[in-house]
Amino acid sequence: MNLLRLIFNTLSELLQAIIYKWLLAIVSIVKRFIDCFKKFKRYHQLPHDDRDVTDKGCGEIDHPSYHRADPLIYSQKYLLSKGLAVTWNNPDIILLQNGVIVDEANLQPNTEYEIDATIWNNAYDAPVVGMAVNFSYLSFGASTTVTPIGTTVVDIGAKGTSSQPAHGRMKWVTPPAGHYCIQVDFYWADDLNPDNNIGQNNVDVAEAHSPAVFHFDLRNSGKLQPNEIKSIEVAIEPPADFSGSQSVNINAVSKSGRHAGGVTLTVTKA
């Protein structure tokens, strides 16, 4: 009799333990289900359907009401990256004196001119407001050091509007040498394409004899002998029956294929 009671009590305790653990498991499953349901409900109550957020509170905005501007200038660097030919006589950068466009081939040293930079917006639905435009110049050559000129601010309307393109202007006194390379660059915080935000304009003019000889500096911006400057000589001999003016684009490219810059040389012959 005592043996039967012992067996019964043992089986009863075992059954109670199994039922108790099973109930605990059910309670845990129900709690997790309720938590998941609450999170799912909060997710669908987020404003503007902005549900693709990270733990850091940052996420990509993809909504019809969100638009991005694309300020740009004729950018040799960007065009070269696309495998296109470029001119270093930038069509979006001109020089003025007393409001009149001047011949960049006949600039005088130590003389004040006004640089005019045409800046476009490639976006149809987003303007650019209060963007800083930086002006600088380099010693004539490729990949040389930069000397700041100044900064101005422009507003650019959307593409196709009457307030586009914009013109940024800056006074500049030419360096004594008479050779120059003007650089215009800008930054927009949410730019659709930030790679087309820098353009440069460098020109030299020489009378063609036999041949026309040009000199410019090339600075090494890489790791092997960094900042070393070499003087480059270019000789251009036009055909005997040539007359008029012809621009020649010289591009500097490293062994790895990286573009260091370039110059546009103009040969004239009567």
Image: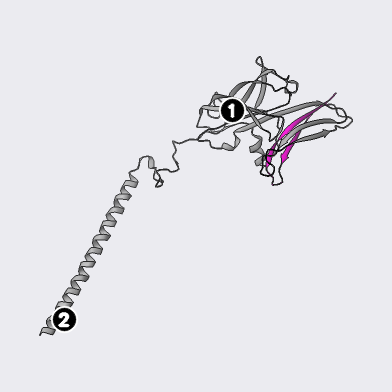
Q: Position of residue 156 (x, y in %)?
A: 54, 26
Mark 2 or mark 1, which has the lower sequence index? 2
Q: Which residue is mark 1?
A: 134
Label 2 environment density (alpha carbons within 10 Å; few <14, some 14–19, many ≥20): few
Residue 245 visible at all: no
Magenta stretch contains residue 143: no
| Residue plotted at (20% across, 74% down) | 14
Q: What's the amino acid at mark 1?
A: Asn
Asked which quadrant contains residue 1, the reply is bottom left
Asked which quadrant contains residue 260, the reply is top right
The magenta segment is: 244-270
- What secondary structure predominates along the stretch shown in magenta? strand
Q: Which residue is mark 2?
A: 7
| Residue plotted at (23% across, 63% down) | 24
Q: Position of residue 250 (x, y in %)?
A: 75, 36
| Residue plotted at (16% across, 81% down) | 7
